[in-house]
Image: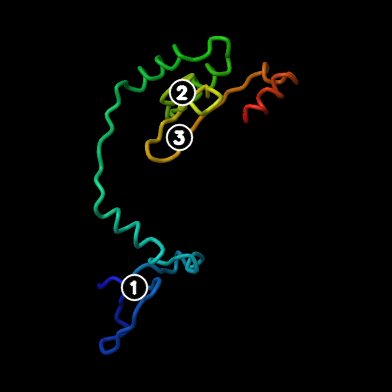
Amino acid sequence: MNYGASQADSTTSRVCSAACYECLLSYTNQNEHRFIDRNLIKDFLIQLKSSETFAISQQRNRLEQYEWLKKHIDPASPLEVQFLDYLYNSGYRLPDYAQFLPAPEIQVQPDFYYDRGDVPSVCIFVDGPSHDSPETKQHDSQLGK
């Protein structure tokens, strides 16, 4: 089938501008028909066609990463240990770093940090009861926490 064209019958040809039942539309996705438009992702698909994939080699296995993180958490924060234990025991992805300042212009240090390459990374703050005092709340608010 030609991209963007479909055969209505053996003698007539029509152009499928956004989507048609011969290519993208179906009974099962009819609630989404108004959102389906191949033209919206054409440039992305063309870029994807020439992309390459690479295997990410991790320096540590899951257990080693868990143990490494536990050595780098704030020892005065039992909630950080609980959070890390929860992630590990539930099979969730572990953070890449603990107590890591991702950029010099950032004024606060996250407790955990997920590096996601070319997309925005994720900072995790595990604030316990010490952050409930009015003074600490004021300080956190000024830092943008």
Q: Is residue 144 above or below residue 32?
A: above
Q: Which residue is mark 3?
A: 121
**Label 2 residue SS:** helix
Pinpoint residue 108: horizontal percent, then vertical percent: 56, 24
Percent of width and height locating residue 144: 62, 30
> Dot 1 corresponds to which residue?
22
Q: Residue 19's quadrant in the figure? A: bottom left
Q: Residue at x 46, y 20 (%)?
A: 98
Which residue is at 43% across, 22% downward? 97
- Lower position in the chain sequence, tag 2 or tag 3: 2
Q: Amino acid at mark 2?
A: Asn
In the rendered view of the protein, which quadrant contains the C terminus? Answer: top right
Q: Which three-letter amino acid code belongs to the residue tagged 3?
A: Ser
Which sits earlier in the primary sequence, circle 2 or circle 1? 1
Query: Residue 89, which numbered label?
Result: 2
Looking at the image, which is closer to me, 57 or 107? 107
Q: Residue at x 41, y 25 (%)?
A: 96
- At label 1, counting other C-alpha atoms closer than 10 Å, the crowd grade (few under 14, some 14-19, many 20 or more) is few
> Compared with residue 21, is residue 128 higher up or lower down, i.e. above or below?
above
Image quarter of residue 136: top right
Which residue sits furthest top? 75
Q: Is residue 38 left or right of residue 47?
A: right
> Which residue lies most toward the bottom here?
11
Q: Is residue 134 left or right of residue 109?
A: right
> Measuring 67% from the left and 16% from the top, which residue is drawn there?
130
Q: Are marks 2 and 1 in contact (CB under 8 Å)?
A: no
Q: Residues within 10 Å of mark 3 (few under 14, many from 20)?
A: few
The answer to whether 110 appears left or right of 46 in the picture is: right
Is disc 1 placed on a helix, strand or loop? loop
- Disc tally is 3
